[in-house]
Image (cartoon, rainbow, N blue to C red):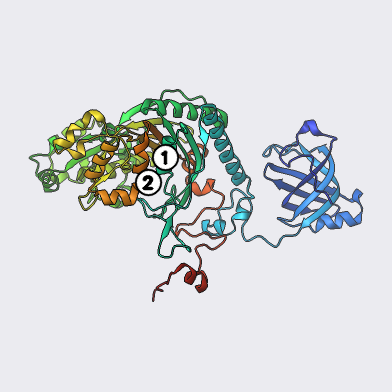
Amino acid sequence: MLYKRTHMCGELRIADVEKEVVLNGWVAKARSLGSLVFVDLRDKSGITQITFNDDLGEAILEKAKSLRSEFCIGIKGVVKERSSKNGNIPTGDIEVFADELEIYSKSETPPIYVKDDDNVDDNLRLKYRYLDLRKNKMQRNLTFRHKVVKCARDYFDEQGFTEVETPILIKSTPEGARDYIVPSRVKNGSFYALPQSPQLFKQLLMVSGTDRYFQIAKCFRDEDLRADRQPEFTQIDLECSFADEDTIIEIQEGFLKKVMKEVKGIDIETPFKRMTYAEAMERYGSDKPDTRFDIELMKLNDLFADCKFEVFTNTLKDGGDIRGICVPGGAAEFSRKKIDKLVEEVKHYGAKGLVWIKSDDNGISSSVGKFFDEAELQAILDKCEAKKGDIVFIVSGTSKVTYDSLGFLRRRIAGILGLLDDNQFNFLWVVDFPMFEEDEEGNIKAMHHPFTQPKLDELYKLDEGDILGLNANAYDIVLNGVELGGGSVRIHDRELQAKMFEVLGLTEDDCQEKFGFLIEAFKYGAPPHAGLAYGLDRLVMLLLGEKSIREVIAFPKNQNAECPVCEAPGIVEDSQLEELGISVVKEN
């Protein structure tokens, strides 16, 4: 019965030779050579080779020969220097000659290989996640995440923040995505919602005098999934009283500097660059620009007012835009087949097509060459600062279509050209977001949320009817083209809050129904306050160089928002539904 280990499997080194040790773990690999048995023993820290020989006696040797992959065992033995060293693992200079063996539990043949380069189907990985998590990479990811969270708790504690838990069962409030709702048994016909964020409660904590709040907060959104999105996710959430935008940004730069130093071993320079939303969209076509490479958007409207290409002239007549990007050295890289693939991809962003112009040793060629002479094509290339060997891509349409399409395209092309360095960390603040935007039906909605404070020196725009021209005291922290988090200065003045609700078309009854408890609290002396929330999963994913947040969450959902391990969501008993006063209409 060997439970009490002396070392983890990945800890032993040449300095430990001749020590007697006890190790516990899982069999990663077993090889029997008759009078010798070699076992790679694995735990979360790594692998150590264990050697069983015929000096042990027939009983223990036969027991060792019975070992198979994923048996859970314990051994006692002496550390020896290996005659044939393995430079691929940290423990490769030593092995442990075992004199005792305990099999804690046997394993059937695993349905997936427990090794980092298994190339197994993602659905199988998620179904047998408890086996997938045995991989050294996955254990490293979980440990890394733990260190980021610990760093957050230590840093914000040092900065005077108090960690406070806010409710999970709350009232449904409009926050931009569908709520997950939970029926009430004691009040049939009424429902709780799971929080999309702790927004209203953290503002109440400011009214309460908590001064500086933070929380590692679980949040829930019923929305379509993708690589960096899950129905339940985690935020590093915070709020400060008597704070403005500069206060929040300074605190957060200190946090990120600490994380990068302590968890990644990298010194980053602060303060980070700040860029307005308007500049980010105009230069990069995105409010979360990746600045690791220099491809930028160029507005080309003035070149096409009187051209023969009706697609462009009709776009301008309809009030749209024509924009392009120049890809240095891209003429040779992008064949017609590759361009056709890009054309199909940008269609997902509303673009009806993709015009290209190449300049190479054969001269100038273009997909719209029959509409423009060589001088006109050269003028376009000059406007885009293109040189021989470059290719220019052009999209026309509404501003949103050109921004979204080229914003996607510049990053897609950078990936193809190998310009996205995962070891380069470009932090950026995007500031001065619009207060409002229009939805697809033309209705006014808050770009962030209705509690964001508008620029107070721009309130005259409301009186002039320039609602969409009003900017907000809002800010996002961006890393390598991904929004890590966002926040804003909040409205603390009741009259200003009422004005913002009015712009959004909310009646007094609407406001009382949706936000009444916050409005009531603001009657009793609300301090100026501001805050921010990070996506913890995204932050960890980026720092590890992973492509999906599923790689940094222990038990994630799949793309159908299902948990393959416990098979949630599932059917409940009719008696449970009756107790809740709920009937289910089953699909045919």
243 vs 468, left or right, is right
- The C terminus appears in which quarter of the rendering? bottom left
Question: Measured from the top left, where is residue 300 in percent x and y?
Answer: 18, 36
Q: Amino acid at mark 1?
A: Leu
Name the one closer to the observer, 541 or 415: 541
Q: Amino acid at mark 2?
A: Phe
Q: Does the image show residue 471?
A: yes
Q: Which residue is mark 1?
A: 204
Residue drawn at the location 32% of the way across and 31% of the way down: 431
Question: Helix, strand or loop at disc 1?
Answer: helix
Q: What is the residue that sits farthest to the bottom in this orientation?
A: 588
| Disc with the residue nearer the chain's start (1 vs 2) | 1
Circle 1 residues within 10 Å: few <14, some 14–19, many ≥20: some
Question: Measured from the top left, where is residue 210 in percent x and y?
Answer: 47, 33
374 vs 580, left or right, is left
Q: CA distance from mark 1 to mark 2?
A: 9 Å
Look at the picture and state if 61 lies above or below 304: below
Circle 2 residues within 10 Å: few <14, some 14–19, many ≥20: some
Residue drawn at the location 23% of the way across and 34% of the way down: 298
Look at the picture and state if 61 lies above or below 485: below
Q: Does the image show residue 420?
A: no
218 vs 430, left or right, is right
Residue drawn at the location 80% of the way across and 48% of the way down: 3
Look at the picture and state if 536 lies above or below 430: below
Question: Measured from the top left, where is residue 506 in percent x and y?
Answer: 25, 49
Image quadrant assignment for residue 9:
top right
Image quadrant assignment for residue 564:
bottom right
Name the one closer to the observer, 579 or 361: 579
Name the one closer to the observer, 231 or 190: 190
Q: Which residue is mark 2?
A: 517
Q: What is the residue that sits farthest to the left in this orientation?
A: 306
Q: Are marks 1 and 2 in contact (CB under 8 Å)?
A: yes
